[in-house]
Amino acid sequence: MKDKSYKFDAFLSSDVTQRVTAVNSYDVLSGIFIEVPATIDKTEAWAQSIVKNESRRDFVLRDNESIAAFSGLVNINLKHGVAELYIFIAENYKGKGVGSYLLECTLKYAKDELNLRKITLYVSDGNEKAHKFYEKFGFVQEGLLRNHSWHRGKYLDRYIYSLFLSDLQSDIDVYKVM
């Protein structure tokens, strides 16, 4: 990862096509809760709807002309200093440390730019990779929502994870990678 130069950047409307491709991969679809399949038209409408939404920030990790991964902070509440996190990786970038790098950039941005204190996320039952990934970063399971979400033909338990950003150890300079 250290020999690769990625750019942490804001999601742009020109990123829609690559987002659709990434979202429609099996691994991503099995873990996110959106209407499938993702289409260009629906994703363009979504991209237009978030432009002025102050309660969210959406990011990409660029590898020259390609996008390696996507992340975002949603339901941002500045009064309480909290937000929810999402992250997903493009198929051909999995297993290369991209997710860890993007997660660290996103958390650093949340702490330094938005002055957030706590990040929450949800992981579906059966997604052991995600459980291990977030726990490796210090996220702690705070709760379980039993049979909470209808997803691809069945109700799933959803685990609530959180991280206090005061616990974040990062020397990434988000401005050098933005």
Image: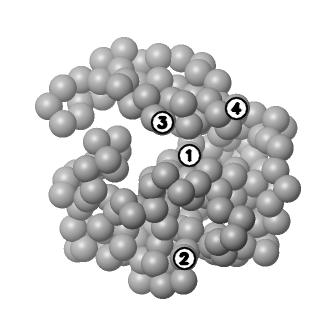
> Which corner quadrant of the image does residue 61 belong to?
bottom right
Disc on res. 63: 2
Which of the two marks, 2 or 4, is nearer to us in this view? 2
Distance between mark 2 and mark 4 Cα atoms: 27 Å
Does dot 3 land on a helix, a strand or a loop?
helix
> Which corner quadrant of the image does residue 105 belong to?
bottom right
Which of the two marks, 4 or 1, is nearer to us in this view? 4
Distance between mark 2 and mark 1 Cα atoms: 22 Å
Residue at the spot x=59%, y=35% of the render? 134
The residue singled out by tag 1 in the image is 85
Badge 4 crowding class, 10 Å Cα cut-off, few under 14, some 14 to 19, many 20 or more, is some
Residue 127 percent location from the top left of the image = 39, 31
Which of the two marks, 1 or 3, is nearer to us in this view? 3
Residue 12 percent location from the top left of the image = 49, 78
The residue singled out by tag 3 in the image is 130
Residue 145 percent location from the top left of the image = 42, 18
Does dot 4 land on a helix, a strand or a loop?
loop
The residue singled out by tag 4 in the image is 138
Relative placement, left or right, of 37 versus 89 is left
Relative placement, left or right, of 78 versus 83 is right
Among the two numbered marks 1 and 3 on one chain, the one whose residue lies closer to the N terminus: 1
Among the two numbered marks 3 and 4 on one chain, the one whose residue lies closer to the N terminus: 3
Distance between mark 4 and mark 1 Cα atoms: 14 Å
Amino acid type indicated by mark 4: Gly
Among the two numbered marks 4 and 1 on one chain, the one whose residue lies closer to the N terminus: 1
Could one spot residue 33 in this view of the protein?
A: no
Residue 126 percent location from the top left of the image = 35, 25
Q: Nearer the viewer, residue 39 or 74?
A: 39
Are dots 1 and 3 in contact, CB under 8 Å?
Answer: no
Among the two numbered marks 2 and 4 on one chain, the one whose residue lies closer to the N terminus: 2
Distance between mark 1 and mark 3 Cα atoms: 13 Å
